[in-house]
Image (cartoon, rainbow, N blue to C red):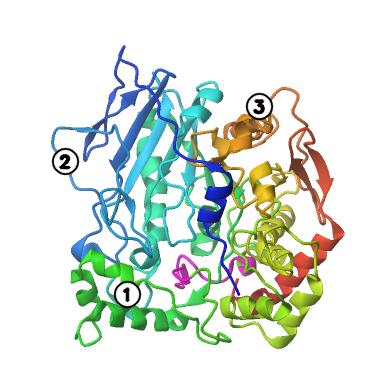
């Protein structure tokens, strides 16, 4: 009756797969970069871009380092080849393989050929998403944006731990490990960039962080980290489809730790954490399964998101809504956006209102009966979408708003109020893809990824990006490039592209990115009212 819309549905319906394979130039080689602990040789591409792939930014988090924050990388002798992507971090519901594993803390750099430490180019640091359960946007290729910028930027991306390896939480982990290890991996990369990026031609004092989905959530966690303490690690933030997940305390997720310990077979161990550290990685597949949350209305449906960051009292001190409302965040220019139909890939295929309330109660057990009724009132029956049940459009609209769209809008409001109404830009991505429309999915979550990084450079992409929607790709890309280069999406935008006005005051304005119809629009009154509902319910929902 209820069905979570997985990526496979979208991929089967509308996407062309595979990262662009780029040809190396045989005419010259890039410089060997000495990072102190290792020397790396990259690849020089015919496009005039050097890529350094699979460089270590931390020691392998194996054995006793499992469930601990990242440690300094080990010293390596000789010259290391940084010529191919290395394994990504294993998440929940994944098995170790040649491309997925626990030894996964690698960083990739794409830089203009010939860039030197005196180039001081703006740095685009990308945080991938995946709901904190997988490295879902791994190994994106930054060659196109470096090329399209006029060789004026350096692009960086990386892996971080996810699932139980990144977010197992308990008092045992607090005492003899580190909570939120996945976020600490990200923090390590920020410091790595500050220390090393000049060797690739980047400016360590000019880093713009950009994330998609859980990567956007991660960016926001670094904006609010340690109560909003500014360690001068970045100067701007691009927040693409902000994933606002529940933030629970360590005590509230004790059930997760206990179930995980039991499923691994460590319940009888005197030192449960030592037992977990000695467990074979392959045993994590079955043990990382999802269980109902305490307070759920029933065993099914299971919650969409299970392994998540927790309030640790240090890096994360309270809800994101709370920190931004109190102004406890780093004040830098922000670019914030979402797709038109954020919820269609994750909402239940609801046949009736009971399906909707059951889904929300099981994902957010703190919701009371009045809150559930208020959701139904705010999202009445909507026009049908093909290939879906009667109440699916309402469920998708509600879930997309609470999880992605409204947190972004609310962040823009707090940024305008606490910092500057002229230093935040918002957009709605509404590029209609025929295949996604035929599947009844609309403009889906992170559909803008290939428009930002270029077709073939962000893994899968809608086929229409090479035909009817081809013109929107450079428009979208150059707004982002402009923001990275100047902290303003307008200065280097594509010639002829509309001026992007900042959010302003009150409910704000945003840019509608749409093929042949890109332009400014106000936030609809109905959406403002719906977002106000989610803000009011945020305490119950722990977001």
* Range of residues picked out in magenta: 306-322
Question: Picture coordinates of residue 419 (x, y %)?
Answer: 69, 52
Whichever of labels 1 and 3 marks the residue nearer the N terminus, that label is: 1
Quarter of the C terminus within the rendering: bottom right
Residue 425 is labelled as none
Residue farthest to the left? 77
Residue 313 in magenta stretch: yes
Alpha-carbon distance for marks 2 and 3?
A: 41 Å
Q: Are marks 1 and 3 in contact (CB under 8 Å)?
A: no
Whichever of labels 2 and 3 marks the residue nearer the N terminus, that label is: 2
Question: Can you identify the residue that label 3 sits on?
Answer: 492
Question: Can you identify the residue that label 2 sits on?
Answer: 76
Quarter of the N terminus within the rendering: bottom right
User: Looking at the image, can residue 312 be seen?
Assistant: yes
Q: Is 136 above or below relative to 147?
A: below
Question: Picture coordinates of residue 10 (x, y %)?
Answer: 57, 51
Question: Picture coordinates of residue 275 (x, y %)?
Answer: 20, 76
- Element type at marker 1? helix
Q: Nearer the viewer, residue 227 or 175?
A: 175
Question: Can you identify the residue that label 1 sits on?
Answer: 173
């Amino acid at each position: 009756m209820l069905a979570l819309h997985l990526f496979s549905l979208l991929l089967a319906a509308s996407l062309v797969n595979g990262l662009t394979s780029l040809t190396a130039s045989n005419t010259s080689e890039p410089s060997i970069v000495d990072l102190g602990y290792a020397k790396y040789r990259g690849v020089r591409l015919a496009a005039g871009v050097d890529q350094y792939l699979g460089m270590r930014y931390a020691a392998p988090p194996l054995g006793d380092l499992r469930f601990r924050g990242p440690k300094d990388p080990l010293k390596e002798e000789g010259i290391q080849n940084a010529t191919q992507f290395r394994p990504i971090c294993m998440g929940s519901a994944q098995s170790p393989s040649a491309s997925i594993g626990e030894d996964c803390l690698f960083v990739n750099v794409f830089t203009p050929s010939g860039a030197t430490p005196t180039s001081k180019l703006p740095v685009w640091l990308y945080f991938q998403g995946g709901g904190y359960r997988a490295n879902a946007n791994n190994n994106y290729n930054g060659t196109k944006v470096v090329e399209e910028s006029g060789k004026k930027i350096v692009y960086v991306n990386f892996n971080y731990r996810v699932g139980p390896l990144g977010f197992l939480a308990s008092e045992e982990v607090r005492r003899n490990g580190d909570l939120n290890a996945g976020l600490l991996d990200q923090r390590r990369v920020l410091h790595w960039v500050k220390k090393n990026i000049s060797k690739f031609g980047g400016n360590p004092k000019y880093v713009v962080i950009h994330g998609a989905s859980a990567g956007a959530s991660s960016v926001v966690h670094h904006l609010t980290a340690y109560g909003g303490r500014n360690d001068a690690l970045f100067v701007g933030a691009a927040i693409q489809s902000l994933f606002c997940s529940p933030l629970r305390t360590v005590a509230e997720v004790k059930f997760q730790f206990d179930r995980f310990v039991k499923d691994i077979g460590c319940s009888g161990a005197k030192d449960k954490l030592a037992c977990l550290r000695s467990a074979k990685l392959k045993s994590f597949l079955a043990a990382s399964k999802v269980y109902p949350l305490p307070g759920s209305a029933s065993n099914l449906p299971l919650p969409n998101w299970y392994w998540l960051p927790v309030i640790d009292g240090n890096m994360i001190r309270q809800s994101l809504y709370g920190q931004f409302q109190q102004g406890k965040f780093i004040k830098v220019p922000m670019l914030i956006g979402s797709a038109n139909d954020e919820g269609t890939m994750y909402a239940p295929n609801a046949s009736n209102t009971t399906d909707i309330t059951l889904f929300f109660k099981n994902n957010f057990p703190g919701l009371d009966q009045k809150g559930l009724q208020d959701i139904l009132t705010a999202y009445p029956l909507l026009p049908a979408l093909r290939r879906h049940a009667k109440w699916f459009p309402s469920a998708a609209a509600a879930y997309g708003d609470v999880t992605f769209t409204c947190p972004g809008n609310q962040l823009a409001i707090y940024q305008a109020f606490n910092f500057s109404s002229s230093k935040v830009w918002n957009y709605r991505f509404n590029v209609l893809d025929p295949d996604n429309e035929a599947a009844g999915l609309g403009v889906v979550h992170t559909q803008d990824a290939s428009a930002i990084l270029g077709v073939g450079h962000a893994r899968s992409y809608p086929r229409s990006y090479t035909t009817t929607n081809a013109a929107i790709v450079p428009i979208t890309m150059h707004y982002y490039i402009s923001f990275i280069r100047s902290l303003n999406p307008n200065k280097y935008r594509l010639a002829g592209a509309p001026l992007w006005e900042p959010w302003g005051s009150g409910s704000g304005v945003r840019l509608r990115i749409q093929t042949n119809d890109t332009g400014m629009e106000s936030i609809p009154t109905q959406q403002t009212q719906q977002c106000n509902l989610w803000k009011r319910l945020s305490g119950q929902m722990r977001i």
